[in-house]
Image (spheres, helix red, strand yellow):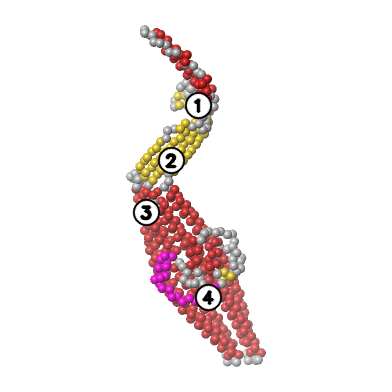
Amino acid sequence: MALRTGAISACILSPVSVQAQEAVPERLTLDQALEIAHRNSPVLLRAQNDEVAADWDVRQAYGQLLPSASASGRVTWQGSGEQQFGNLTAGDLGFADQPSYYVSSYDVGVSYSLDWATLKGPARAKAERRATLARIGVAGAELAAAVTRAWVEALRRRELRVTADQQLENARINLRLAEGQMAVGTVTPIDVGQAEIQVGRAEVQVLQAQNGVETSRMRLLQNMGLRVDQPVEPVAELVLYEPTWDFEALRSMAAQQNPTLLASQRVREAADLGVSAARSSYFPTLSLSTGWGGFAREASNPDFLISQAQAQTAANISRCVSTNDLYRRLADPLPPIDCSELVFTDAQRRAILDSNDQFPFGFQRSSPSVSLGLSIPIFQGLSRQRNLEAARIQRDDAAQDLRERELALEADLRIALANVRTAYQSALLEERNRDLAERQLTLARERYQVGAITFVDLMDAQTVLSQAESDRIVAVFAYHDAVTELEALVGASLRD
């Protein structure tokens, strides 16, 4: 029986594909079962979703090395009426009856901040991503092991069904022998009754074996992530492979491929970078920022602005007249100022109207600014030291967990290899016992036909064969179960 648990790698590296329901071939090999399970198992698909988040964590870590930029814009309407500036109003300042205004503005800013934690961010995110992929590998290995066990169990149930059919056929043969012997008067009806009871018991065993076949089929489909209403029959050749594997070679393979061990190693690597990130809180932070903006303001009624300009011109003319009058009164009069030039012209009116036409995009740029800062943390209430110690503890825990995994893996490998060797020898012995029991039953039937033994002796021989057949099936599949466990520890297929 070729059990390819090396297909675990396909459950880890192949792209995700989700299907509502996939057709299953009625004659199903283990490789096909693993491939279908990879495409449909909710457990594995859920674990693979974590890879997408881990990829974005890496991108985000690189994005933190780039400057951040922001832009904002505002549009405001300010109604007419009195405006207050502290304790004064616009009327107090000579600006009564203010019109409504439309105001628009924008601000653009660019900032950049850099510290040691940001610099180490991509490396830490990559380590976390490797740990996530390792956890996905563990999920794939667990799925492969579960599907393999369910597939082997289905094979076991099918073999038990075949054995139950053989026992029923043997019971019917015994019944015909008993009926033939009673016909010639060599046995009593008691022998026939016992044979009929034996047939009835064998029929019950066939019924139970058939139920076992159906339940194992449904459990296999469930582990594959499919509905259980599909016909499927696992196919394989039952072969006993002599366990010639060397322990050191197996340990070397497991050190490189065991999913659980690899996951512990990746967690340890991420924990190391976590300590470095926690230590960075003692380092200074460099920050750089710049910004600029614009402002546009437009009065809803430009007549107010024209009136202000006209009033300002009239005030200038009044001051000019007053100044000329003062010049005339001097003992040594000064030449007068030409006040005729101080008039409000149409060109000034048009300029006021043009300058008021600013909303919404006639911005006047404000002065840009640039700032550079260096922040050095001094004391933060021992929170930094607490976080650093927590990161160190997490790293130490990860190191101890890795050491525990290594010790457990070595012990499990030695035990699994010993179990495989024992199971192989046991299966060979049980096959020999089955052959001996089958020959004993044939001899018992021949002796029963000639009246050398009783029907009870014949039934005993039949029982011995039934038990020997059951023990053979148990031993053969115990061998394959042991090899499956060994392959799960190694992380690769050991048989072709």
Label 1 neighbour load within 10 Å: few <14, some 14-19, many 20+: few
Q: Nearer the viewer, mark 4 or mark 2?
A: 2
* Amino acid marked by disc 3: Val
* Labelled disc at residue 238: 4
The answer to which of 80 and 358 lies nearer the viewer is 358
The answer to which of 485 and 183 lies nearer the viewer is 485
Residue indicated by mark 1? 355
Q: Is residue 345 above or below residue 434?
A: above
- The percent position of residue 150, horizontal first and vertical second, equals 53, 68
**Range of the magenta residues?**
236-257
- Looking at marks 3 and 4 on the same chain, the residue that comes earlier in the sequence is marked by 4
Label 2 neighbour load within 10 Å: few <14, some 14-19, many 20+: some
From the viewer's perspective, tell me whether residue 443 is left or right of residue 426.
Answer: right
Residue indicated by mark 2? 110
Residue indicated by mark 3? 275
Gap in angstroms between the C-alphas marked 4 and 2: 70 Å
Q: Nearer the viewer, mark 2 or mark 1?
A: 1
Gap in angstroms between the C-alphas marked 3 and 4: 53 Å
Image point (53%, 66%), residue name: 34
Label 4 neighbour load within 10 Å: few <14, some 14-19, many 20+: few
Q: Is residue 253 magenta?
A: yes
Q: Secondary structure beneath disc 4?
A: loop
